[in-house]
Amino acid sequence: MYVGRDLTELENIDPADWSDKELAFFHHGMQQLNGYLTFQGNVKHEKIMEEIKKRGGLHQKATWTQGTEVHYD
């Protein structure tokens, strides 16, 4: 389960200032609803995808307790 700021809290915050978990969670949700998003939703999703690309994807260093993919739940 995602625990963090909701989209209304992140509305006026640049995606560069979002955490990896926030990017992963909202990208996944918007990706699934892509056909139903308004123009503004598509613009926000594009900004999220651009930030993910700037960060080189959503990967983290693997440890004994977690893998390399960012999980928001």
Image (cartoon, rainbow, N blue to C red):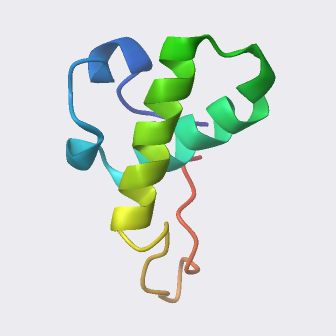
**Which residue occupies 54% across, 19% down?**
41
**Which residue occupies 21% across, 19% down?**
12
Residue 73 lies left or right of residue 43; in this view the side is right
From the viewer's perspective, is residue 54 above or below residue 21? below
Q: Residue 3's x, y, as percent?
A: 46, 34
**Which residue occupies 55% across, 77% down?**
66
Q: Quadrant of the N terminus?
A: top right
Q: Residue 68's x, y, as percent?
A: 55, 80
Q: How many marks overall?
A: 0
Q: For the view shown, which residue lies furthest in the front direction?
A: 39
From the viewer's perspective, is residue 49 above or below residue 45? below
Q: Residue 58's x, y, as percent?
A: 49, 66
Q: Residue 39's x, y, as percent?
A: 56, 14
**Which residue occupies 77% across, 33% down?**
32
| Front in this rendered view, residue 58 or 3 | 58
| Front in this rendered view, residue 38 or 22 | 38
From the viewer's perspective, is residue 2 above or below residue 50? above
From the viewer's perspective, is residue 23 above or below residue 3? below
